[in-house]
Image (spheres, rainbow, N blue to C red):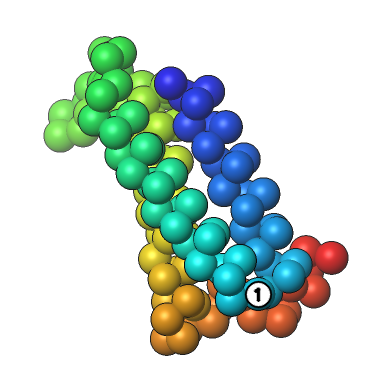
């Protein structure tokens, strides 16, 4: 499952680069829908994870995630934040994700 989460991250990164290169409205909508679908898949992966979620080492007041579960949770959090930023960019509220400076950095 952590490997599947990493593959989903690579797919969403490729879709972002594609969107940043072309900056077309239709492509932005497709990327937004794909990002939302993959965030839902990651949410299901996080809920359905069958392995150990917490390590045996537990200092007072803390419980650390295992590396495998931590990869899935971190992937979910990052992709959910990117989904939020894509929603802001698509609806014209804030274009911090697809501004021209970001497109120049990628080239």
Dividing the image into 4 quarters, which one contains the C terminus?
bottom right
- Extreme residue in the right direction: 107
Q: Position of residue 101 (x, y in %)?
A: 72, 79
- Extreme residue in the left direction: 61
The answer to which of 19 and 1 lies nearer the viewer is 19
Q: Secondary structure at mark 1?
A: loop
The answer to which of 7 and 30 lies nearer the viewer is 30
Count numbered badges in the picture. 1
Q: Position of residue 76 (x, y in %)?
A: 39, 43
Q: Position of residue 35 (x, y in %)?
A: 47, 53
Q: Is residue 31 visible?
A: yes
Which residue is rendered at x = 54% and y = 59% of the image? 31
Q: Is residue 106 above or below residue 11?
A: below
Q: Position of residue 46 (x, y in %)?
A: 30, 32
Dividing the image into 4 quarters, which one contains the N terminus?
top left
User: Picture quarter containing residue 81?
Assistant: bottom left
Which residue is rendered at x = 80% and y = 74% of the image? 104
The answer to which of 58 and 17 lies nearer the viewer is 17
Report crowding for label 1: few under 14, some 14 to 19, many 20 or more residues within 10 A (C-alpha): few
User: Picture quarter containing residue 23?
Assistant: bottom right
Which residue is rendered at x = 40% and y = 32% of the image? 72
Using residue 52 as the reference point, say whether residue 23 is left or right of it.
right
Using residue 100 as the reference point, say whether residue 97 is left or right of it.
left
Q: Is residue 52 above or below residue 42?
A: above
State the residue position of label 1: 24
Which residue is rendered at x = 61% and y = 66% of the image? 27
Using residue 20 as the reference point, say whether residue 56 is left or right of it.
left
- Extreme residue in the front direction: 26
Q: Is residue 78 visible?
A: no
């Amino acid at each position: 499952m952590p490997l599947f989460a990493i593959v989903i991250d690579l797919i969403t990164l490729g879709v972002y680069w594609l969107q940043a290169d072309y900056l077309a409205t239709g492509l932005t909508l497709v990327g937004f829908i794909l990002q939302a679908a993959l965030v839902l898949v990651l949410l299901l992966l996080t809920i359905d994870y069958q392995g150990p979620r917490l390590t045996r080492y537990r200092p007072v007041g803390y419980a650390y995630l295992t590396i495998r579960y931590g990869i899935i949770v971190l992937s979910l959090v990052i992709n959910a934040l990117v989904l939020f930023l894509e929603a802001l960019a698509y609806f014209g509220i804030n274009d911090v994700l697809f501004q021209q400076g970001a497109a120049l950095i990628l080239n």
